[in-house]
Amino acid sequence: MLLGTGLFLLKPWPIAFVVDSILGTEPLPGWLQFEADPEGRIALIVCVALTFAIHLAVAALTACHSRVAISIGLNGLQRVRSVVFEQLQRLPLSFLREHRHGDLIQRVAWDTCSFQTMFQHGLITGVTAGLSLILMIVVMAQLNIALTLVSLASLPFMLLAIKLFGKQMAAHSAEAQEADSQLASLAQQNVAAATLIRTFNREDTETESFAAQAESARKKRFSQHARELAYLAVLGVVFGGGVAAILWMGAQQVLAGNATVGELIVFLTYLAQFYEPLNQLSNIGSTLSAASAGVNRVNEILEATTPPRGGDPAPSLASDIEFAATSFGFAPDKPVILKLDLKILAGETVALVGPSGAGKSTLLSLIQRFNEPTHGEILISGKSISSVDPIALRGRISSAPQEPVLLPGSIAHNIALGKPEASQNEIESAARAARSHGFISRLAQGYQTTVGDGSARLSVGESQRINLARLFLRESDLLLLDEPTSALDAENEAAVAESLAVLGQGKTCIFVTHRPAMLKFAKRVIVMEAGRIVADGAAEAVAEQSDFFRLLTNPAAQ
């Protein structure tokens, strides 16, 4: 950058020597005078060669400088994206629930580019333009102090324009990026719900909704660009006035004999170059205003509070689990669990049943510290799990969520999520226990079949059996199952239920279910309603206490 800027200042000088000395009457500089060159032809060749060499060197240095800056900017972008993604892995699930998934994707994938923009078009351009400006002012002042002062007279007007338009551009840029984020969220939600939308013939309605949001985004983006264009127009007027004033004064000085034509050419060339870094510096205002909106959106993720990492080692989960006056709600006025007192003994197999929204799945999430109690605490071996390292805690738990989830990758990779070092034989044994080996073997690539978004599609039941295979592979003290057989047919459900009963022997097992095939393996049934326990005990006793459970196990009783 330093070398390129220095050579940039030499560009007009060979032209000035040609105009003043070779074509005019001014004496040549000593280093251009040759005894065998009375007519100046050699000097002309030297000036032409220097012109080409300087332009070539400036171009090469500028290309190298830009390449380095781009490389640094892209490396920085990669680091920022990685840090933001890592932060998303650490943020509580409540944060992810409170934000649109499309919006978070927009921030990770695109808003992070604002950091690269700030570096390349903010810092690098600012330093380069500022250095060029300082050096040119020094050289211009040596040539003609009066014209230099006229050139600098445009600076206050430029700063005034930045002040007047800067805040407006930043505000409208933030609004435009938010509108684009809403557009991305709408598209993401539409793709995720494509089956539902087509089932109810909502394609045209969804298209109209998207078009309306796209129009809103267009208006906001146009409003942002309109202010940027107005800003640039004002700067163009300021620069145009400065050039006109300098051209007038310079011409008057040449006519008066106070300057040569070559000097005027050098000064006018510098003037154009002088206004270029000024223009770059003025454009930084609009660039940084737009980029700052994206940076602020990314910083909202980076500055969000994450659960503390580390803590005590996880105790053995093959021990009693106790809820002591435990309460939790996703919102202060909407409690999901109310002052729950519950003790589950080590080695018990407990079924949680109850109507939708009773708090059953939330209870499992509290044990895994996906959510933290708002009141009370949860104890394992008499120790509050709030002091236990959450990663170590989850490492001793095998769980299956209500909705089966497959990550992009092979089926073998998905089964071995909890035990990456597992052998192929171990993976296949787990799949057999989960009654999934048969359908996997029938796939063209077997266990190496790629699944996940955009890959091989499996039925919900098949996906659920792969999720269950993970449980059979991972060694753990505690099993937490949320409707583990809800998507299976009667034959597979009975077989998987028997396998789970074998898997749960000697372990504490808590599962949410509404399926009689699973209930018969429970030694204890807990019925929850509205965040409270309304019945607890053996199945026969609970049937006498709870109408819900009695109807669940004996529909004919209704």
Image: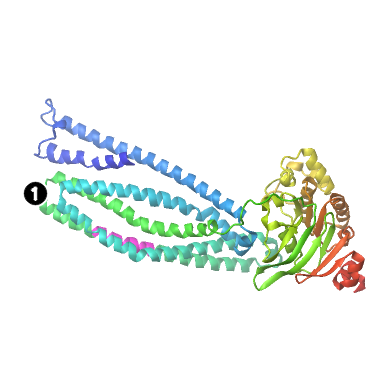
Principal secondary structure, stretch drawn in magenta: helix
Please report the bounds of the magenta region as a residue range.
226-240
Closer to us: 251 or 389: 389
- Which residue is farthest left? 256
Note whether 335 is above or below 466 in the view shown. Answer: below
Residue 318 placement (x, y as % from top left): 80, 52
Residue at numbered disc 1: 258
Closer to us: 414 or 456: 414
Residue 250 placement (x, y as % from top left): 14, 52
Q: Quadrant of the N terminus?
A: top left
x 85%, y 57%: residue: 349
Is residue 145 rendered to the left or right of residue 472?
Answer: left
Task: Give the amino acid at mark 1.
Answer: Asn
Examine the image and state in which quarter residue 230 appears.
Answer: bottom left
Is residue 95 rendered to the left or right of residue 115?
Answer: right
Label 1, residues with CA under 10 Å away: few <14, some 14-19, many ≥20: few
x 36%, y 49%: residue: 125
